Amino acid sequence: MKIVITGGAGFLGQLLVRALAARGSLTDAEGRERRIEHIVAVDQSQIGKLFVDERVDYVVGDIAASGFIEHVMEGDTDSVFHLAAVVSGAAEADFDLGMRVNLDGTRAILNACRKQSGRPKLVFASSVAVFGGELPPVVTDATQPTPQTSYGAQKLMSELLIGDCTRKGFIDGRSVRLPTIVVRPGKPNAAASSFASGIIREPLAGEISACPVAAATAMWVLSPQSAISSFIHAHELPAAAWGARRALNLPGLTVTVAQMLEALRAVGGDAAVARVKMEPDERIAAIVNTWPARFETPRADALGFPRDRDVESIVRAYARAYVSG
Amino acid sequence: MKIVITGGAGFLGQLLVRALAARGSLTDAEGRERRIEHIVAVDQSQIGKLFVDERVDYVVGDIAASGFIEHVMEGDTDSVFHLAAVVSGAAEADFDLGMRVNLDGTRAILNACRKQSGRPKLVFASSVAVFGGELPPVVTDATQPTPQTSYGAQKLMSELLIGDCTRKGFIDGRSVRLPTIVVRPGKPNAAASSFASGIIREPLAGEISACPVAAATAMWVLSPQSAISSFIHAHELPAAAWGARRALNLPGLTVTVAQMLEALRAVGGDAAVARVKMEPDERIAAIVNTWPARFETPRADALGFPRDRDVESIVRAYARAYVSG
């Protein structure tokens, strides 16, 4: 089978490429276990060292550019993992760029899916940023998404399109709403949530990190490992398990900045925590504070999606994988 | 002030043009009462006799065509009433056409709004078709929209865009979710709800009408007069009354087909009811049955949106206005 991964050179994309290559097979839309013969990892650029495997190709391009993704998907793509996005801070700063990549990019992928001979499976990396504004104290599976960022609105519009195209039989779509992913390795990015990884990652590397939100700020977080497991689990669940509702809040952990810093202390000591500087940034706080931090996810739990144990385990797993010495 | 009405040659569009011309003024986005100097009614075609007034211009064109609506809105448009749409049955039959008009058309209008020197008000005719699938027995203001038709998905995506563009300060947007409008005069159309008017209109004109759904089928309905009042009320409410939530379920009446036929009997007698033939159509029923029929609308009620008295009054008002003799 042929698999296309957008955002495939990114952090999560690379973890997913590795996980799929190691796994070796997936279930197609007809319910058949199929050997993975070809993975095409698409990204707007290739930064850093990429995972090399004879089954994996890398293609650089703009998913919203006319004809690009259609060309990439030619030759009967069986499954797409759509991870590419303009992140929250950038989509807020440049409305048109966010619309182009986050909505038109999804549309281009859906149009390309419709040209396949089969009915591709599509796993979409959505976000809890679809929620915002006045919310109940705990967000449930019945809570109405009311995005208060352009990123959240664009993710929700994409979910709606994926749901409708699934209903129409064009694809077999599954959207998972990711909590904030911690800990991301590498450099800070333009996501408003970037600091949540930064305040762990930089101190463990001996560097200073600015925290733009208050210590009491709570977030709904997920480890990268659980995110990858969730993508694959979302793909593997039978269509009947999803039914008509093709978007899902993923399980996560409610963690305050203060709790993240305690986990940092447990793993990196007081010296690490001392490297975090509280530097309030209203622009970032305004975005982050629209995101809900407390969820109940009975549907995802019943469907068997993974849940992290606690934030200290997440920080420890990061340190094991990425911190030398 | 200059007002643009899309779908302006349609039934509701024409009622709105007349109502605005009679009213003579509206409140602009800065809260100032302004004299209506120019109304541009845009539509894809002009069928039948149009309301003539020196302040009203008619322009034929495709709102999704590049540059068209931008050209129409040149010269500082203060307010837009966006009523144009590919209706539910047609959007279900032709996915791409629905996307083009119902989503891309809205985007074209929003882009044109951003080019005005002021911040235009935008009233959007959305639909209760944003709801569907598994729903609570009564839909409330907190119920999560889960459209099960392409039309509903496209209306909801447009609402989200309008909400986000309002939040960004590009426009002052207000989306009202219309119940099924009864009684529409004229001819049947491709809306799945077309029969709801047909089973009143045709028998009162001495013609046979087919009813494609069961007599027990309940719908959430609104009279054309209340729809027009709601558009204008939505426009006139101060921005603060809307707050961050720019989409609203309108008040309506829960009415079964059987109750509509009893209202028909009260107005047109047994002979009229005998002209309705029950002819089940699964395609139509499948769409109509995804729409919720029972709502509680405390938010719209508190904001002062109008409510029809009962279905017999609606049928009587129709007969007075449109049935000769």
Image (spheres, coloured by chain):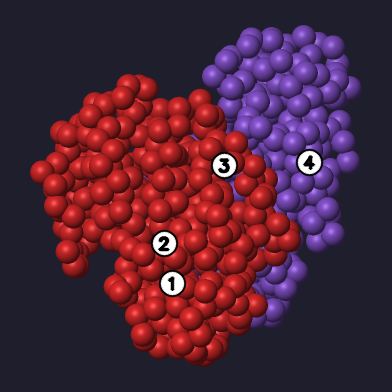
Chain colours: A purple, B red
Q: Position of residue B26 (x, y in %)?
A: 31, 32
Q: Looking at the image, which residue is at 85% across and 12% down?
A: A270
**Residue drawn 22% across the image and 62% down it:** B44
CA–CA distance between discs 3 and 4?
Answer: 29 Å
Amino acid carrying mark 2 in the image: Ala
What is the three-letter code of the residue carrying label 3?
Answer: Ala
Q: Mark 1 packing: few (<14 Cα in 10 Å), some, or many (20+)?
A: many
| Secondary structure type for disc 1 | helix
Image mark for residue A295 = 4
- The residue tagged 3 is B300
The type of residue carrying mark 1 is Ser
The residue positioned 41% from the left and 82% from the top of the image is B203
Q: Can residue B273 be seen in this view?
A: yes
Chain identity of mark 1: B
Q: Distance between the residues labelled 1 and 4?
A: 44 Å
Element type at mark 4: loop
Pointer 2 chain: B
Q: Tell me the chain of label 4.
A: A
Which quadrant of the rendered structure holds the N terminus of chain A? bottom right
Q: Nearer the viewer, mark 3 or mark 4?
A: 3
Closest to the observer, B169 or B176: B176
Give percent across and percent down for residue A264: 82, 22
Q: Earlier in the sequence, mark 1 or mark 2?
A: 1
Query: Label 3 near label 1: C-beta < 8 Å?
Result: no
Q: How crowded is mark 3: few (under 14 residues within 10 Å), some or many (20 or more)?
A: some
Q: Measure the C-alpha gap from mark 1 to mark 3.
A: 25 Å
From the viewer's perspective, is B295 left or right of A324? Answer: left
Circle 2 sits on which residue?
Answer: B317
Q: Mark 1 points at which residue?
A: B197
Q: In this view, does A3 lie above or below A98?
A: below
